[in-house]
Amino acid sequence: MSGNSFGKLFVVTSFGESHGKCVGTVVDGCPAGLRLTETDIQVELDKRRPGFADVTTSRVEEDKAEILSGVFNEYTSGAPICMLIWNRDVDSSLYEQIQYKPRPGHADYPAHMKYGGFTDYRGGGRFSGRITASLVMAGAIAKKLLKQFSVEVLAHAIEIGKVKLNRKVTIPEIRKNVYRNNVRCADLNLAPLMEEQILKAKEEKDSIGGIVECLALNLPIGLGEPFFDSLDADIAKILFDIPAVKGVEFGAGFQAAHLKGSENNDQYILSKGKISLKTNNSGGVLGGLSTGMPLVVKAAFKPTPSIGKPQKTVDLQKMKEDTLEIVGRHDPCIVPRAVPIVESAVVIVVVDHMLRSRLIPSVLK
């Protein structure tokens, strides 16, 4: 059974491999009448490419978006929207040398076993972070849809290596600052310290991880389809589909395990004549349904597994232990590139659930 599609009404299907001809996505279920151009998609794709080469991979892809179907006269027609980017800057020679030596921390070995040795091993194939470009393309459509309904989704890096954001940044700071620095941090004083962490790891032929926080603002109350399609469950699922994500939490998350009920419960209050919550430890979700408070979710990213330090592996042909030093073009930290990817993942889920709740019509007017 295929695992390449996500969603019930806003269905996103991903295709392509890291070193194949292209990477793309098909979005089925987008309402007709949404003004959409390749520029809209490009704006989001460009966010996925941090501008400072020292903190990211040296692989330089133009990532120029092409819309192949589903848009007519610059408006969505209601048909499936197919989009892609071509892989141009590809060098598979290094992967040919290690195709039988699974890289530690990568999916090479389990993929080799699952697909009987037929999987595309170049650049990680379907398991590469490059596949997330398909999420960003689909997310660009979802973001434009949500603007019609005043829903905004914002992500930012709150931790890279040992540098952690220890203050509450404001929404205006996130809007203004995140894409003004190379590490996608809303605190411009902290950003250089995060960058130093990445450069230090790179100098040591190593890598580091971090945490991305994402907020969804102005969500309607009651989004979600419990039991198995609850809002937080679907968001967690798509976030875990992003390579390198190893942890997801909402609101107080794991810290809630250390609180008393009286400390963790979000008490109801009246604010300007409307029901609100005094706190938001639930992260905007209770019982799988949105509460009307900002949805707050964090995704923890492991260090990039491709590092230059010697690591042990096994030669699958010779069945002998070997040592592997990975060379090539890799991110010393995936977090800066991941910020717009997390945003895209969350907006895809929100649009799907707004369609399921009939809050978005099938034709926009």
Image: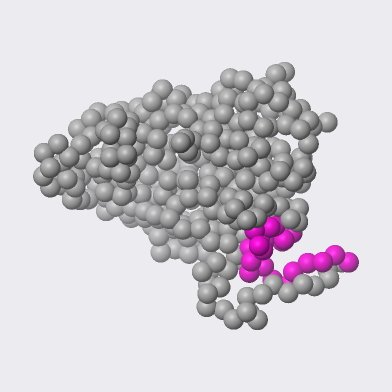
**36 above or below 225?**
above
Closer to the camera in the image, 75 or 160:
75
Residue 233 position in % (x across, y down): 57, 54
Query: Which residue shows up at 58% across the image and 68% down it?
Result: 252
Closer to the camera in the image, 171 or 149:
149
- Seen as rendered, the residue at the extreme right is 273
Query: Which residue shows up at 43% across the image and 55% down it?
Result: 246
Q: How would you classify the magenta stretch by its main secondary structure?
A: loop
Which of the 4 image quarters holds residue 347? top right
How many tags in the picture? 0
Residue 237 position in % (x across, y down): 52, 50
Is residue 306 shown left or right of residue 364? left
Residue 189 position in % (x across, y down): 53, 60
Is residue 316 shown left or right of residue 256? left
Point out the stretch of residues depicted in magenta: 273-293
Does the magenta segment cover residue 282?
yes
**341 above or below 290?**
above
Does the magenta segment cover residue 113?
no
Q: Is residue 214 something one can see in this rendering?
A: no
Query: Which residue shows up at 64% across the image and 66% down it?
Result: 282
Residue 136 position in % (x across, y down): 55, 38
Q: Is residue 165 something one can see in this rendering?
A: yes
Q: What's the image's color scheme?
A: one colour
Closer to the camera in the image, 3 or 31:
3
Look at the image and tell me in which quarter the C terminus lies: top right
Query: Which residue shows up at 76% across the image and 27% down it?
Result: 33
Is residue 38 shown left or right of residue 107? right
